[in-house]
Image: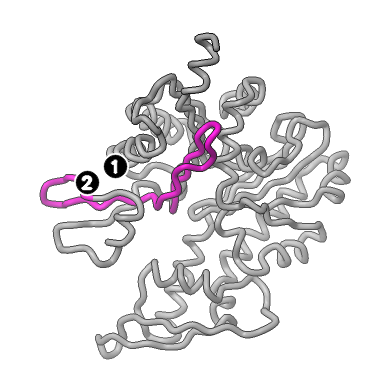
Amino acid sequence: MNLRKLSSFYSSDLGIDLGTANTLIYARRRGVVVNEPSLVALNKRTRRIEAVGSEAKEMLGRTPRDLEAIEPLKEGVIANFDLTEQMLRHFIRQAQRDGRALNSRIVIGVPGEANVVERRAVEEAAYRAKARKVFMVREAVAAAIGAGLPTNEPRASMIVDLGAGTTDIAVLSHSGIVYACEVRIAGRNMDEAIIRHIKHRHKLLIGNLTAERIKIEIGSALPLSAPLTTEVRGRSLTEGAPRSITATDEEVREALTGPLNAINHAVREALARVPPELSKDLVDAGIIITGGTALLRNLDQRLMEETGLPVTVDENALSSVAVGAGKMLENEQLLSRSTCEALMA
């Protein structure tokens, strides 16, 4: 084995989905090796990070007075640079088998509408976390590659990446973007809508984790064949004491109307802007949806009703961005065509 092949074998090249809710890291030849909440627990008194990822999430809403659970990213972009850098450094060390950044190249997915300053902040955080070379790629493009769409062929493919902070939509052909848009409405907005609904209808205050659980357990985009309910515990706004209520899938669906309508509108707008020559391709191929929010019950059916096109949930919806970013590292031509700089050229 020559030196170049040996270097490639031991390379710690990584594809990273730096998401609002979760960070996933794909390591070359090993697959997804990190899947952790994008959270840090900060000691407000000492300014020291006490926990990262899953350990920090367990503290969410339960932390002592001196500890604060913080999400360093908001709507897919960096809100706190120092905390993002330290969190990213922690996850990169976790991903590397020997703890060293030997020949390390990193591809990071970023929201499509992230501006130059926001992209530079992510890039700088990765370099300060000891990366050798950093490439930025639009999340929807990475998701399309991770889902196995034929992005380099002369026919159109449409991907809708539904994350926690953003919904990124792209129509791709010939390794380029035909049309793309992003709405900063996604899973977190659904959680917030559930919190507002429970507060208004039941006079009960709940937190983000409870709202997320409700969404996962009984949330849906269209009526279900069998009704679902779940117990919800929170603090009564009238009595100030702990209380529990039973929430139904119907009322949760009602709460999700606003975010779902915004996502539907963005998808229809994208379809309206696709050149007529490529529209036939989408009739045949349909739409692929990825991301954690794509797993909401009947979301694919609702989009199908709204657009008249077949809609498929990617079988690896949660990891498609990280996997796609990792695959780019194995194909130099694909990498050179798919970076943010190349796509904007």
For the record, the magenta segment spans 21-50
Q: Which mark is residue 68?
A: none
The residues tagged by marks 2 and 1 sit, at their Cα atoms, a distance apart of: 8 Å
Instruction: Determine whether label 2 and label 1 are within 8 Å by CB.
Output: yes
Q: Quadrant of residue 341?
A: top right
Look at discs 2 and 1 and give the one toward the viewer: 2
Q: Main secondary structure of the magenta part?
A: strand
Question: Tag 1's secondary structure?
Answer: helix
In this rendered view, identify the residue nearer to me: 38 or 92.
92
Q: Which residue is mark 2?
A: 49
Quadrant of the rendered image containing residue 78: top left
Q: Residue at x 22, y 63 (%)?
A: 63
- The answer to whether 114 is drawn above or below residue 193 in the figure is above
Residue 264 x %, y %? 67, 60
Residue 56 located left or right of residue 123: left
Percent position of residue 82, x then y:
28, 38
Q: Does the magenta-highlighted stretch encompass residue 55?
A: no
Q: Amino acid at mark 1?
A: Leu
Which three-letter amino acid code belongs to the residue tagged 2?
Ile
